[in-house]
Amino acid sequence: MAPAPAGLVRALSAAASALEGSADELNRLDGYAGDGDLGITMSEAARAVKDALAASQDQEAAQLLSTCGAGIARKAPSTSGTLVATGFLRAAKAVAGSNGHGVDILEQAFVAALGGIQARGKAAVGDRTLVDGLDAVCTSLRESLQAGRGLGEALHFAAAAASGATDKTVDMEPKVGRASWVPQRAIGHPDAGCAMLAIALTAAAAEVTAAGPGTRPGLIC
């Protein structure tokens, strides 16, 4: 059993640090549509990921993702924390059952995460949730796979897709969750869940690029 690639560990650590550093902004955005505590929840999730990384250095990629998901479920058991945990756990199953490499397996992991989060949260594309960002990321990764892009480039395109999806939510009316109770409050502001995804992916992409070409092919396997 090979341990998880260093690129995956660094990408997850960078994403976690970025979310911790963006806690106030995520709380602010969430305040327009929810309880205003997404930054707190994602900080707890980020610490769970860092704890998993520190304690699971010998685990292979699928096990590491599963450990992260389980840790988030324990330490950030709110609605948003549970959805993120579900995404990690579904991604772990996809990675464990895949023979793919590079962008191929990354795309499979995100598609699985999207499916799990949709099933758990009962949200669809267009409902102005994290699902909109994940759907854009999956589409971007699919396009990168077809275009033959390398992993680092594909991650940058995926992060840009998440940012683009976040911008589009500014004019969208929330249709599920607490935000749908008073939808007018949220209009004019980006969805906090989409913003969270964009922040995490932007940091991960930057870390993979900064680490050098040698780490890119082995981000997951």
Image (tube, grey):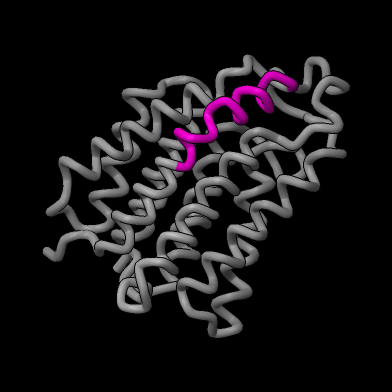
Percent from the top left, x then y, of residue 155? Answer: 52, 65
> Does residue 26 belong to the magenta stretch?
yes
Q: x, y (%) of residue 44?
A: 39, 26
- Left or right of residue 154: residue 178: right
Residue 38's image quarter?
top right
Q: Could you say which is closer to the camera, residue 49 or residue 126?
A: 49
- 31 or 18, which is in the foreground? 18
The image shows residue 41 at horizontal and vertical percentages of 47, 24
Q: Which residues are magenta?
A: 18-32
Q: Is residue 45 left or right of residue 29?
A: left
Which of the two residues, 125 or 221, is positioned nearer the viewer here? 221
Q: Residue at x 44, y 69 (%)?
A: 209
Check the picture and name the quadrant holding the C terminus. Answer: bottom left
Residue at (45%, 56%) from the top-left corner? 204
On screen, 210 above or below 110?
Answer: below
- For the N terminus, the image quarter is bottom left
Residue found 48% across the figure and 61% down from its top: 206
Task: Answer left or right for 189 relative to 163.
Answer: right
- Give coordinates of residue 66: x percent, y percent: 29, 44
Secondary structure mostly seen in magenta is: helix
Q: Which residue, as the protein is rendered here, is positioned at the far bottom?
A: 148
